[in-house]
Amino acid sequence: MYSLDINFLNDREGQATVAAKPTRASVPMGEQVPLMIGLAVAIALPALAGGVWFFFQIRVTSLEAQQQELQTQI
């Protein structure tokens, strides 16, 4: 029904009770190149898509204005 949990590791003497934070090893620049390329692609693709969308929105607006002008001439 109930279990008794006893942690005997806390009773040991001579060991630090607070675990030290492991240090991160620095990554050489040569190993970061694929990361930088992926980051550049991840930024460039949405920027390119946004630029194309913006261009088409401007083009549609100018074509609609041209269509309105032609409708008034008819």
Image (spheres, rainbow, N blue to C red):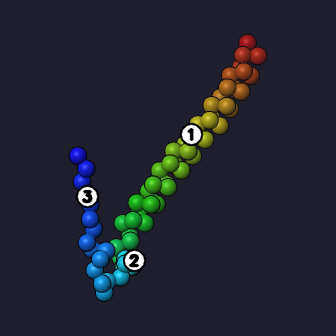
Q: Residues within 10 Å of mark 3 (few under 14, many from 20)?
A: few
Q: Amino acid at mark 3?
A: Leu
Mark 2 — residue?
18
> Which dot, 1 or 3, sits closer to the camera?
3
Picture disc at residue 4: 3
Pick the residue in front: 33 or 62: 33
Please report whichever mark, 2 or 1, sits nearer to the chain's N-terminal start.
Answer: 2
Question: Callout 2: helix, strand or loop?
Answer: loop
Real-space Cα separation, disc 2 to disc 1, in angstroms: 55 Å
Q: Amino acid at mark 1?
A: Trp
Question: Callout 1: helix, strand or loop?
Answer: helix
Picture disc at residue 37: none
Task: Please state the horizontal and vertical placement of residue 20, each as a whole percent of the image.
Answer: 39, 79
Residue furthest bottom as drawn = 14
Q: Is residue 48 above or below residue 8?
A: above
Q: Amino acid at mark 2?
A: Val
Task: Please state the horizontal and vertical placement of residue 19, each as a whole percent of the image.
Answer: 37, 77
Picture disc at residue 53: 1
Q: Which residue is painted at 76% across and 16% down in the image?
A: 72
Q: Is residue 68 above or below residue 11?
A: above
Task: Please state the horizontal and vertical placement of residue 22, each as a whole percent of the image.
Answer: 37, 77
Q: Is residue 39 above or below residue 50?
A: below
